[in-house]
Image (cartoon, rainbow, N blue to C red):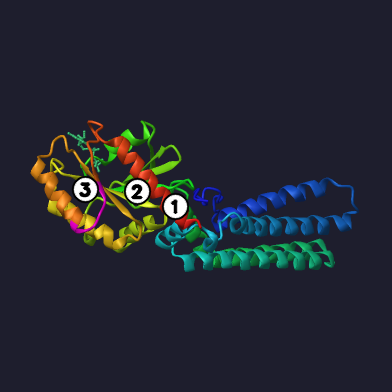
Amino acid sequence: MKENPFKKMPTILMPNELMEKALRRGEKVAEEFRKKEVPRYLKAKIVEENKVRTIASVISDNLQKYIDKTPPVRKLPKFYQEMVEVLAGIDEFKKCMGAFKWASDLVRKLGNEYAKKIRKARTPQEAAKLRKEFVGRVKSILKQIHPEMAFIAVAREKLKELPTFKELPTIVIAGYPNVGKSTLLKKLTGADVEINSYPFTTKGINVGYLEEFQIIDTPGLLDRPLHERNDIELQAILALNYLANLILFIIDASEYCGFPIESQIKLLDEIRELFKIPIFVAINKVDLADEEAVKKVEEELRKRSLDYIKISADKELNLEELKKEIKRRAFEEFKKAHM
Ligand SMILES: Nc1nc2c(ncn2[C@@H]2O[C@H](COP(=O)(O)OP(=O)(O)OP(=O)(O)O)[C@@H](O)[C@H]2O)c(=O)[nH]1
């Protein structure tokens, strides 16, 4: 399962909003009980008791819903676990769920206690006083978990924006800007490339499908030297390890992209060091590049025992062979990962 598991998380209400919701519902229920034919001396107590029960269950149920609709982090695919760690912090995230559970259980328990006390009240005034006391205690419980509610609300906003990835052999494209990554992604997968947002880059993340394969381009992430990255960006990049079965590294042999071959090879070396998955290289723009430059790139790749193919994304040269190679390699790795 690689579908974004956070999409189902409900909106997290803040303490005052949740309290208002519960009070409104309590008032509505009270209104119904006021209309009932009950002896006068009993009515006030019944109204107050049901108000309390309703308030308790609205709050307790909502908090429990937040827990139930939040995927258990440790059971998620590793990629999404990494995302929780980077965007929120797994320990903090779990602590918040613990706080919700504590508050939900406590409010439910208090609701029962106060409902019983109200039933035993001797006067309507005493019943109303108990109800007010209950509301005060619930407010203070919600106030205590305000930081946790705010934290999860913010985390949810970020997590639910993560793209949905399919459980398919996955290829991640890397290489300097302008080497031809998006041209290639389009040529390989057809025009329907989805642009999804990714919290770590303003350029989003582009996902395309080639038969039963998923190809991802991550502009802004794998397109400049990794040693220039801050910790969060690096973690976001490393998380791609859990998503990808193959990295397709594109080198522009023509250097028309504006980056010399040496720099491009350096980025390749950094990626080789950081990623545990196989790398396959496409030497692009061979229609533009001079032979010497292509030979130089080939030499560097051979030194590193890296497999490669020479292509032109724009002129559609060798793209069928490239498809065959990346599919075979990604599929093999995918099988290994799922054995
Ligand atoms: N001659 C030639 N031009 C190419 C080839 N592949 C891509 N281009 C051109 O190179 C330029 C950059 O290509 P893009 O696909 O936008 O590069 P990119 O790597 O996706 O760039 P970013 O989105 O900035 O990361 C475009 O003008 C393409 O038309 C090729 O094989 N031959």
Secondary structure beneath dot 1 equals helix
**Image point (36%, 32%), residue name:** 190
Secondary structure beneath dot 3 equals loop
- Is 292 left or right of 232, judged from the image as shown? left
Question: Marks 2 and 3: which is nearer the front?
Answer: 2
- Is 299 left or right of 195, judged from the image as shown? left
Q: Which residue is mark 1?
A: 334
Q: Is residue 154 visible?
A: no
The Cα–Cα distance between marks 3 and 1, rounded to whole angstroms, is 26 Å
Span highlighted in magenta in the image? 303-308
Q: Which residue is mark 3?
A: 176
Which callout, 3 or 1, points at the residue further toward the start of the chain?
A: 3
10 Å crowding of disc 3: few (<14), some (14-19), many (20+): many
**Image point (24%, 57%), residue name:** 305
Q: Which residue is mark 2?
A: 172
The Cα–Cα distance between marks 2 and 3, rounded to whole angstroms, is 14 Å
Q: Amino acid type of disc 2?
A: Val
Q: Determine contact: label 2, label 3, CB under 8 Å.
A: no
Q: Is residue 314 magenta?
A: no
Image coords of residue 307 (percent x, y): 26, 51
In terms of depth relative to the viewer, which is nearer, 32 or 123? 32
Q: Amino acid type of disc 1?
A: Phe
Q: Is mark 3 within 8 Å of ligand 1?
A: yes
Ligand 1, image quadrant it occupies: top left
In terms of depth relative to the viewer, which is nearer, 20 or 193? 193
Image coords of residue 8 (percent x, y): 56, 48
Vertical position of residue 2 compared to residue 122: above or below: above
